[in-house]
Every structure is written in structure tokens, then in C-alpha cells.
Image: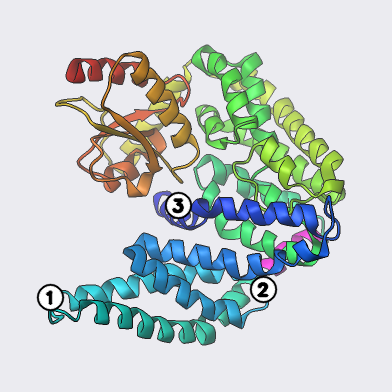
Amino acid sequence: MKERVQTFGRFLSGMVMPNIGAFIAWGLIAALFIETGWVPNAAFARLVGPMSHVMLPLLIAYTGGKVVAGDRGGLIGAITAMGVIVASENPMFLGAMAVGPFAGWVIKRFDKMMDGHIPPGFEMLVNNFSVGIIGMILCLLAMLGVTPLVNGLTAMMSSGVGFLVEHSLLPLTSVFIEPAKVLFLNNALNQGIFSPLGIQEVQEAGKSVFFLLEANPGPGLGILLAYCLAGKGSAKSSAPGAVIIHFLGGIHEIYFPYILMNPFLLLAVIAGGAAGVLTFSLLDVGLVSTASPGSILAITMMAERHCYAGLFLGVVLSAAVSFAVAMPLLKFLGKDTTLEEAQAQKDAMKRQAKGIAQPQAASVSGKINKIAFACDAGMGSSAMGATVLKKKISAAGIEGIEVIHTPVSSIPQDVQIVVTHQELGERAAHSNPNAELVLITNFLAAPEYETLVEDLKKRNL
């Protein structure tokens, strides 16, 4: 079940993450030029509405269709999305996420049916008119059928969250958010739920606390600081570097293994998250757009200008509460095992309970030309891991090896070795069954890096 949710979350994230630059551009325009912005400008502020209502949903739908069926899928996805965009007064991000991939699937099925049945010389005619005609039909169907469903779903979610807000219960969302993040479901939460709700609230209030529910780096910072003081072995030695990457770089996945090593620490991040959300709510703190990555720098840039004091206070308090709860948990419930040993033991027990064989690390054979570092969305921890691995390969004097970062569910088939977190090993094996797996637990100082480099020396030098 968790793997299916992760796959779904990665698919949602795969539609949003490539367009984060557009979200940032929209957020900066809003932060600068709306009435409460840094330099209010009515003419420039006119861009905010069309960008959120039309541009961003179209980009999401195009990307979703393209993931399924290439350029033709992207084109028909954008056409279909216009149906839900025009039929709704709210930004149709959920609608775009639904109809874009579906339209891509439809045109892919059509192309498969027509393969080998198009007379020579009519290929371009059939290709162009098929997208136009099918796109028109899907656009109309989306306008009449999908929009009411999405509006109803959005109203339901808004009512639920509104209930929590009205009764001052929004901090309780941390009970679900923080454990879900540690299970690598953060993309499903952020891109699938909080971002659409946040963008809708921005249209009404100019900012939204929803952008901070998952992105707040405070709870994870508290955990890592506790490990700096009370951790043991490699967990303690790697924690200071993880603090920098998490807090300034915004890669939250860096602290997940530290919690998986001692699951009692979930209590700490839940308490820290709730403290942060409570502070943000009481002080009316919000962001004008999604902050990606979730670093303190990105969050500050996306903050409404009157919210800085409350924003920093919320982050500090959430880190302090998380730290305060984590310290006794580490001292009295800590284990003598290292980070790597604890993670390996947990994964082995989980696989044994499920009857799944333990994935093996790569045993490199033959010359290696391409290595992929895979993570859930393909842009956070995988980008960091790829950079670390590139430096180690370069320092070893090995040339001719391409190291890329990629989503774990869409690993290119020409990749020979895949490096990924142990939690994602099964998904990586499904994505590219022919590649050899190197499973790690510590993004910064995994001993498997050194072993891999030594094997590459033998094969490529």
C-alpha cells in the first residue's frame, strides 16, 4: 500500500516539479506587486490571476500528458485542460492533474490502435486531426463532467481544513503530515493536497499557511540538532552536514533515516510540527506560493512581507520543541547500532514479514557508462547524491561515466547502476529491472559510495 501511495505521489509530483520555476515566477510576482507586496504595482499585479488560473494548470496538464504519451500527450493534455480551466472560477490544479494524464493515455491508446493501419502519405493528416478531434471531445467532456467533480472534491477538502482552522485544530494535521513525510509521502501531500488548497487561498487572502504545513524545516532541524549532541556513531558524525543540507538546501529527505533509526522520534517531529503550525496560525503567517525546495531561504523568499517575524518564530519554535522532545528519546531509548545497521535491520525485518527477498547491492561487471541516483521526485536527495557521487568518481580519476538523477519510478533503461535509498529499493527494481542496485541509508557518507568507486576503478580504468 505504501509503495502504491508513493508511486501515486511521485506521479503527482512529476507533473508539478518540472514546472516549479513557473510557480516561483508567479510567487515572486505576487510577493512583489500585489496590493500588500513589496512594491505594489497594479499593472504588474494583473499577471497574478491569469498565471494561476491558466498558465500553471496548462503547464501541469501538458507535463502530465507528456509523461504518458510524449509530445502528443502533452498537447492533447493542454487542450483537455482548457475545459476545466474555463468552467471553474478557481485555479484548476487538481483538474489539470486528472485530465492531463488521462488525455495522454487516450491518445496513446488511439496511436496504438492505428499503428500499421494508416495509408502511406496520410500520417501527418491523421496525427494532426486525431489530436484536434479527440482533444476537442475530451475538452468538452472535461468541462461538463470533470469540473463539477473536482469542485466538489476541493470544497470537501476545504471544508475539512476549514473545520480545523475554525476550531483551532490545524496543528493536529501534523499527526498525519510528519509520519507521512518520513515514509517518503511528502510529495503526495504537498503537490496533491496542500499546494492546490494554498493557491486557492492565495486568491482570496494573498497568502496561505498551507504552503508551510509540509515545507517547514523546523521539525527536521530539531531532530538533526539532537543527533549532533546525543547521537552515536555515524549518525552523530553525519548530522552536522545534514543540518546544512536540510535547513539551507531544503532537502528534507536527509533527516528521514535518522527518524527511521529510532521511530520514537516521530513524537518529536509531530510535536515540533504542531508547534510550528500553531504559531503560524496564531500570527497569521503564510506564503504567497509553494516553496521548493523547503529551505529557510526559499520559504523566506515566498513569505508575505509582513510575516517574517512570525515565520522565523514558528520555524525556531518548531525546531526547539522537536529538539526538546528528541533529546530524552535519544538518550534513554537510543540504540547502540549505527545509522546504517539500524536501517538495514529494519528493512530486512520488513521484507521478511512481507516475504520479499532482500535486494542486493550492485556487483559491478563490465564497463559502466551510466549511473543514476534515484529518489522519489528525482530532484531533491537524488540531485544531491548524484553530485556527491560525481565528485568521488572524478577524484578517483575515472572518466566516461555519466551520473544522472531521476525519479525512482521512471529510471532510464540505459542506466546500468542505480543508487537509491533502501526504502525505495523495491520501486527502483520495478522501474529498471536490468540495472544493478546500490542501496544506501546515508546520503552524505554512505560507505557504499567508496565500494562502488573501487569497483568502477577495476572495470573502467
At label 1, counting other C-alpha atoms closer than 10 Å, the crowd grade (few under 14, some 14-19, many 20 or more) is few
Q: Quadrant of residue 347?
A: top left
How busy is the neighbourhood of tag 2: few (under 14 within 10 Å), some, or many (20 plus)? some
- The amino acid at mark 3 is Arg
Amino acid of disc 1: Gly
Can residue 442 be seen here?
A: yes
Per the image, the residue denoted by label 2 is 90
The type of colouring in the image is rainbow
Mark 2 and mark 1 in contact (Cβ < 8 Å)? no
Q: Which residue is mark 1?
A: 116
**Whole-percent x, y for residue 328 in the image:** 68, 21
Provide residue 120's location: percent of width, then percent of height: 12, 79
Q: Helix, strand or loop at disc 2?
A: loop
**Which span of residues is magenta-colored?**
156-165
Is residue 208 at all visible to an observer of this figure?
A: no
Residue 71 occupies quadrant: bottom left
- Disc nearer the start of the sequence (1/2): 2
